[in-house]
Image (cartoon, rainbow, N blue to C red):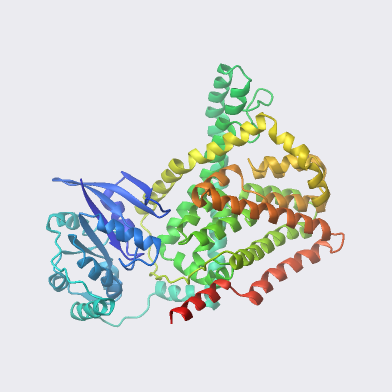
Amino acid sequence: MRKIVLAGNPNVGKSVVFSQLTGSKVMISNYAGTTVEFSKGLLNTEKESFEVLDAPGTYSLEPTSKVEEVASNLVNQADIVINIVDATNLERNLFLTAELLERDVPLIVALNMIDEAGHKGVKIDVKKLEELLGVPVITTVAVSGEGLKELVDSLPGAVNRRKTVLNISDRWAYVGDLVGKVQQVVHRHHSWLETLQDASISPATGLPIAAAVLFLAFQLVIGLGEFLHELLDDYVFEGFYETLLLNFSELLGGSGFLHDILIGKLVDGKIDFEESLGVLTTGVFVEIGVVLPFLAVFYLMLGFLEDSGYLPRLAVMVDRSMHRLGLHGYSIIPMVLGFGCNVPAALAARNLESRRERFIACTLMSVAIPCMAQLALIVGLVGRHGFEYLAVVFAALFFIWVVLGLIIDRFMPGYTPSMVIEIPPYRIPSFKAQIKKLGMRIRGFLVHATPYILGGILVVNILYVLGIINYLGVIFAPVVQGLLGLPGDAVSTLLIGFLRKDVAVAMLIPLDLTARQLVIGAVVLAAYFPCAATFTVLVKELGIVDMAKSAFIMIVTAFSAGFILNLFLDTIIPAAYLAAALIALSIILPLLLGSTSDRRELSDLDEMA
């Protein structure tokens, strides 16, 4: 079966073309030896079937990043390349076309978004462009499917007559000459969408817009995710699935080692999916009942932001702030997602380019971003003692997030490169493409994350059934009492937190803690270690060595924060003043210290000069 590779710049409609060509038979794969994803599907024509690969968006086949390297490698493996070109930005897109013409692979150019080009006053002589390139050029509107039949019909005519290898300056000269001969631009007034585009990246208006978008996205993920969670809980887990497991429990005799591992402990002859701690009960409930609802809504929201063109604008607006922590603007995505659930947040971090960025983002997210279930319990437990104590919890987590980012940025080798991205125009996303993308992402999550999530819960559950967790609780009780000022019984909550952090927070209720102890317990539980589901996904994403380093940082940070709060909160500084001081320091420190990434990058440029 011959391979067709879709190649093009980011944001040119490749994914929509891919979706239209391949239908529903799609799978997402990581390129060998990397975390870079690409989509693979089948295209069946009357005469032949093709394997279609959607290469990551790239500006050049001379790679400067892992993503561009993967795109270049996929092109080298292709039997036919379909080069998706944005008709509204012809000159920038044709640079990649010029490189493809130099490769020994049959080529077809799909001139996409030709309707938008017309609306913007861009007129292109398609026949002349085809003649000058020497390869078929098909005009398309991928969202509506216009031109895709002609694109498929042109596959037998895919050719590549140009073999001359040019250097970069000659390539740009070639592209400039080409565009001058085939393109004409006429003046037109800005539309309201273009006015909104400009407002979205201007600091005066862009920051309020970014805050509004993040707030609405957060409310959507939390609100709709919680609704779906309740729906699954009421009608799937407490109905059909519980009956099925109770029957299975009877087959296993109602008790015993295997029963406790798979089903867990029954409560009054019933299954408590949060506290049974079985692989088939709590394990499945965590993934399907808790993680999946928030993940599905987030992926739907993320797909809309991607295809509408807002995501690059959001990244631009927060880039300067994130860069001070060793990250760049796109890192805001896993941070926002973490408030819904840390598992999809860890998966979202794979979109960051370097190992260094993924390590910093995953560590900061795991330490300082509590998931929604944990967040709700913290608000309920701590908030009843007064807003000032709740403010200390969030101020402490924000302070940890900032200071830890500054520290890792300074001590971790390398630097975070500047973010150079194209900002596409606003577009109305295709509903069909959104549903297709959502299905692909959820399928990828279920296939790749399930073994790690259930495997991690299985290991923890075995330790719990064997009594090892209780034994560890006895050993570490003096440390918890002396360092954190918490009662010895709180050790069990820290250990259970590895399985479910929200359950661990709930276990603080019967300990009759004071307000300051609740604050300390909530901060330590939020920061000290990810839950089993997140941990196992992070092992997959970061590798065992980096995850071990990250875990060490988490534990040291959590106990240090707990010790400092135990030392100062209410004994030396009242809660309200401590919260205000932590927030002020969180804002001032990055401004005073700046980013070592910037200095290292400038140093490297000086050496190159």
- Residue 466, compared with residue 574, is above or below; it is above
Q: Quadrant of the N terminus?
A: top left
Relative to 40, is 335 on the left or the right?
right
Q: Position of residue 519 (x, y in %)?
A: 77, 53
Q: Position of residue 490 (x, y in %)?
A: 77, 42
Q: Position of residue 70 (x, y in %)?
A: 35, 58
Relative to 379, is 98 on the left or the right?
left
- Would you say residue 277 is visible in this rendering? no
Relative to 180, is 539 on the left or the right?
right
Find the residue positioned furthest to the front. 607
Residue at image position (40%, 68%) is 426
- Residue 578, compared with residue 40, is above or below; it is below
Q: Position of residue 51 (x, y in %)?
A: 25, 48
Residue at image position (49%, 39%) is 450
Relative to 316, is 427 on the left or the right?
left
Find the residue positioned furthest to the right. 571
- Would you say residue 462 is visible in this rendering? yes
User: How many numbered marks does the figure carry?
Assistant: 0
Residue at image position (55%, 62%) is 214
Quadrant in which residue 512 is drawn: top right
- Residue 585, compared with residue 180, is above or below; it is above
Q: Quadrant of the C terminus?
A: bottom left
Q: Nearer the viewer, residue 342 or 182?
A: 342
Q: Nearer the viewer, residue 37 or 91?
A: 37
